[in-house]
């Protein structure tokens, strides 16, 4: 099925967010079920979230992707700030935007995210009951991922965050923290190498995806726990999709264990974390699960 993609902008706490709306070509003018699709940490809307949005539109949903505040084509200073509370509010404000559209059924709105957004979307849904169904693909709590990956370096970033704020106030350049090395070789850990292959090669590189975050993001992230209150989503449904070979699989498993009966864990055999960004047959299997899930839970 051919789909239509249009550029949109909507407000999020005083900042204009840049988004794309994907529509089935044969949309009849009625009110459609809609899904907000969020991008990974340091990613942008033109990458994996575009793939999922397009395929969900082919399945008959209106799908909205957007660049998080401070990132991509969206507004916000300093550039590259990873503010977890704002990231969650971006989802809530995306739902508000969809609720005002004449072609959306405001009682049939779901959210999903990939990687970091696979944690921010459930966090937003914990208290926003307009969201009727929630899903994460390779869902990852960014704080835990960075902190557990290198605890000493993370503590240093948190300690330096205050000084970074002062520097910005003095008009000095924003200090950025790269999340990927400049190159990889045989000694590079497999998890790092697969992120590099996605973000730093023609496979998916994009000029707006800078592969770094503002240093002072650390003191915001350090107090954030995306899944601590995941049970608040219940009895609304939560679907977490993860690859059996993903280093982040544990986030999905714990979220579903904590939410109980309204949760569903779908494991994609053989897939790594980044395989679920863009590689078939893994993405096709994930989309099949998402389509069934949202069809079941966003009924009229």
Image (tube, rainbow, N blue to C red):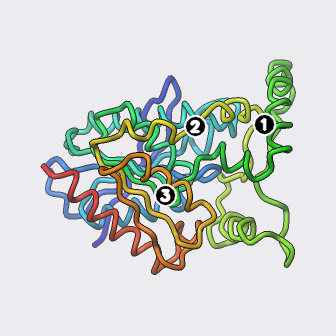
Tell me which label, 3 or 2, sits earlier in the chain.
Answer: 2
* Residue 182 vertical placement versus 279 (above, below): above
Q: Whole-percent x and y of residue 25?
A: 25, 63
Residue 101 in sight from this viewpoint: yes
In front: label 2 or label 1: 2
Kindly identify which residue carries mark 2. 225
* Residue 163 vertical placement versus 275 (above, below): above
In front: label 3 or label 1: 3
Q: Whole-percent x and y of residue 91?
A: 44, 38
* Residue 7 vertical placement versus 272 (above, below): above
Report the quarter where the N terminus lies.
bottom left
- Identify the residue at horizontal 54%, vertical 75% (top origin): 271
Tell me which label, 2 or 1, sits earlier in the chain.
Answer: 1
Residue 102 in sight from this viewpoint: no
Judged from the image, the secondary structure of the residue bearing numbered disc 2 is loop
Q: Residues within 10 Å of mark 2 (few under 14, many from 20)?
A: some
Q: Toward the viewer: 106 or 202?
A: 106
Q: Toward the viewer: 26 or 38?
A: 38
Kindly identify which residue carries mark 1. 215
Instruction: Residue 82: name its quadrant.
Output: top right
Distance of label 3 from label 2 (alpha carbons): 16 Å
In front: label 3 or label 2: 3
- Identify the residue at horizontal 87%, vertical 27% (top origin): 172
Q: Residues within 10 Å of mark 1 (few under 14, many from 20)?
A: many
Q: Specify whether 90 is left or right of 157.
A: left
The disc at residue 179 is: none
Kindly identify which residue carries mark 3. 253
- Identify the residue at horizontal 48%, vertical 46% (top origin): 66
Distance of label 2 from label 1 (alpha carbons): 19 Å
Distance of label 3 from label 1 (alpha carbons): 30 Å
Judged from the image, the secondary structure of the residue bearing numbered disc 3 is helix
């Amino acid at each position: 099925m051919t789909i239509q993609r249009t550029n949109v902008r909507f407000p999020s706490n005083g900042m204009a967010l840049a988004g794309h709306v994907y529509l089935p070509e044969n949309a009849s003018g009625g009110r459609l079920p809609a899904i907000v699709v969020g991008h990974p940490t340091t990613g942008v809307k033109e990458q994996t979230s575009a793939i999922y949005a397009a395929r969900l539109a082919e399945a008959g949903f209106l799908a909205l992707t957007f660049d998080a505040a401070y990132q991509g084509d969206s507004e916000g200073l300093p550039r590259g700030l990873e503010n977890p509370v704002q990231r969650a509010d971006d989802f809530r404000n995306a739902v508000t935007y969809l609720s005002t559209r004449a072609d959306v059924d405001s009682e049939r709105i779901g959210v999903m995210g990939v990687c970091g957004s696979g944690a921010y979307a459930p966090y937003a849904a914990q208290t926003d009951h307009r969201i009727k169904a929630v899903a994460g693909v390779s869902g990852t709590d960014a704080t835990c991922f960075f902190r557990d990956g290198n605890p000493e370096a993370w503590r240093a970033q948190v300690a330096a965050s205050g000084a970074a704020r002062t520097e910005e106030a003095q008009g000095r350049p924003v200090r950025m923290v790269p999340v990927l090395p400049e190159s990889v070789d045989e000694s590079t850990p497999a998890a790092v190498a697969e992120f590099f292959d996605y973000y730093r090669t023609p496979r998916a590189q994009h000029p707006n995806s800078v592969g770094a975050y503002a240093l002072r993001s650390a003191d915001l992230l350090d107090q954030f726990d995306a899944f601590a209150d995941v049970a608040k989503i219940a009895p609304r449904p939560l679907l977490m999709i993860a690859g059996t070979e993903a280093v982040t699989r544990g986030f999905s498993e714990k979220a579903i264990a904590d939410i109980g009966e309204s949760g569903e864990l779908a494991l994609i055999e053989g897939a790594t974390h980044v395989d679920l960004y863009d590689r078939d047959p893994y993405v096709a299997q994930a989309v099949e699960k998402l389509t069934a899930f949202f069809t079941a839970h966003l009924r009229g």
